Image (cartoon, grey):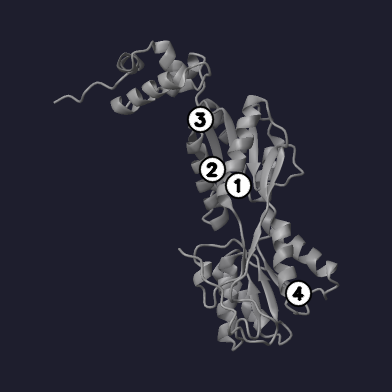
């Protein structure tokens, strides 16, 4: 038995009792259509299971309502959850997304953007946590509206970032305010922009409070990298506080300290960064810096749409970070009985 014919725009118009032109205007997001008419058209689209032909609509002078997203190939928590935030924000504004992954060296940036142009996207969001991607964006002359998420605000493109340096300053100040003489740091990879910003914030916080300059060990965002750095730090009896560049790194640091007989937080306090869903269930529950990836997604889609409409104001948006205090940080040499912080629900 042959499948039923695919519904076309004329079928939607007939069911809604309007003209094909009105259906086209509703699907393209044009103003001047009454709410009642728009609801009838949208109801007919759902009832018939109609899927508009984007290419045909663009050729007819309409809008594709499709945004392109370029993402670096990575499984790290921050970039992946930024994509979730972008998808939710695009869906809330009735836009589709066209995803393209990019190698970390970004050699194929020009061809990637050309592919998105050929797909009729109206604007592009680049999730750019590594320096080569930002450099590649600066080299490409892109006629489409473009927003770089997590990029360096010093670049020419519009950007949306979480305040990484201030988050690191908050983490470091928290440990210094507890009475630790200094704070050691296990940083992220050198070519990651967030890692560089967090290291800068840590260093600035130490300098602002005239704390002795402590060690900065290079990690790789992983628990195994944190474990290797933690094993080195555990051998130094003067280490009482560690700021880890992300929560996975903090997990490895805590494991290494525990195996060396250094209790957290009685002997060494540890603070992470990201506030992953698991961080409240570490042993002990992890003090960390929370990043609001949902807000990042909303703000970057909002900024891109304003660029597309020519109504943009501020081109560089900064989303604040937040300190979440749990059980892994305490005054030096002092037990934490009586100061347990409720764990965040999953």
Note whether residue 77 is visible: yes
Q: Which residue is mark 2?
A: 86
Q: Which residue is mark 1?
A: 296
Disc 4 vs disc 2: which is toward the camera? 4
Question: What residue lies at 68% left-to-right and 87% top-to-bottom?
Answer: 333
- The percent position of residue 346, horizontal first and vertical second, equals 45, 63
- Do the residues bearing badges 4 and 2 touch, measured as CB atoms within 8 Å? no
Depth check, front residue: 216 or 276: 276
- The percent position of residue 208, horizontal first and vertical second, equals 84, 67
Q: Earlier in the sequence, mark 3 or mark 2?
A: 3
Note whether residue 192 is visible: no
Measured in 3D between alpha carbons, the distance from the residue under mark 1 to the one under mark 4, in whole angstroms, is 29 Å
- Do the residues bearing badges 3 and 1 touch, measured as CB atoms within 8 Å? no
Question: What residue lies at 65% left-to-right and 30% top-to-bottom?
Answer: 307
Position of residue 262 in the picture relative to residue 238 (left or right):
left
Measured in 3D between alpha carbons, the distance from the residue under mark 2 to the one under mark 1, in whole angstroms, is 8 Å
Label 1 CA crowd tier, 10 Å (few <14, some 14–19, many 20+)? many
- The label shown at residue 176 is 4
Position of residue 52 in the picture relative to residue 94 (left or right):
left
- Do the residues bearing badges 2 and 1 touch, measured as CB atoms within 8 Å? yes
Measured in 3D between alpha carbons, the distance from the residue under mark 3 to the one under mark 2, in whole angstroms, is 13 Å
Q: Which residue is mark 3?
A: 66
Q: Secondary structure at mark 1?
A: helix
Q: Earlier in the sequence, mark 3 or mark 1?
A: 3
Disc 3 vs disc 4: which is toward the camera? 4
Question: What residue lies at 28% left-to-right and 22% top-to-bottom?
Answer: 6
């Amino acid at each position: 038995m042959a499948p039923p014919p695919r519904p076309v725009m004329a079928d939607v118009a007939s069911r809604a009792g309007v003209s094909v032109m009105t259906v086209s205007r509703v699907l393209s997001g044009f103003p001047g259509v009454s709410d009642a008419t728009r609801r009838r058209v949208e109801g007919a689209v759902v009832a018939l299971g109609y899927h508009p032909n984007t290419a045909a609509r663009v050729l007819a002078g309409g809008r594709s309502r499709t945004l392109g997203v370029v993402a670096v190939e990575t499984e790290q928590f921050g970039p992946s959850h930024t994509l979730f935030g972008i998808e939710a924000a695009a869906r809330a504004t009735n836009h589709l997304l066209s995803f393209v992954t990019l190698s970390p060296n970004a050699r194929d940036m020009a061809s990637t953007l050309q592919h998105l142009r050929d797909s009729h996207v109206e604007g592009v969001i680049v999730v750019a946590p590594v320096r080569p991607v930002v450099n590649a964006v600066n080299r490409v002359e892109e006629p489409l509206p473009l927003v770089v998420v997590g990029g360096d605000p010093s670049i020419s493109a519009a950007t949306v970032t979480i305040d990484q340096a201030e988050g690191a300053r908050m983490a470091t100040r928290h440990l210094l305010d507890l009475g630790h003489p200094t704070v050691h740091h296990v940083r992220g990879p050198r070519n990651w922009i967030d890692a560089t910003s967090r290291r800068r914030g840590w260093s600035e916080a130490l300098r602002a409070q005239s704390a002795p300059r402590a060690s900065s060990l290079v990690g790789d965002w992983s628990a195994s990298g944190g474990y290797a750095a933690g094993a080195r730090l555990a051998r130094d009896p003067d280490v009482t506080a560690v700021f880890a560049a992300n929560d996975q790194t903090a997990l490895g640091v805590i494991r290494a300290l525990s195996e060396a007989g250094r209790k957290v937080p009685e002997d060494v306090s540890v603070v992470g960064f990201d506030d992953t869903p698991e961080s409240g269930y570490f042993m002990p529950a992890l003090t960390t810096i929370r990043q609001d990836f949902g807000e990042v997604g909303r703000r970057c889609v909002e900024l891109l749409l304003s660029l597309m409409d020519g109504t943009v104001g501020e081109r560089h948006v900064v989303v604040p970070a937040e300190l979440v205090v749990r059980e892994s940080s305490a005054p030096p040499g002092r037990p934490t009985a009586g100061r347990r912080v409720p764990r965040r629900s999953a």
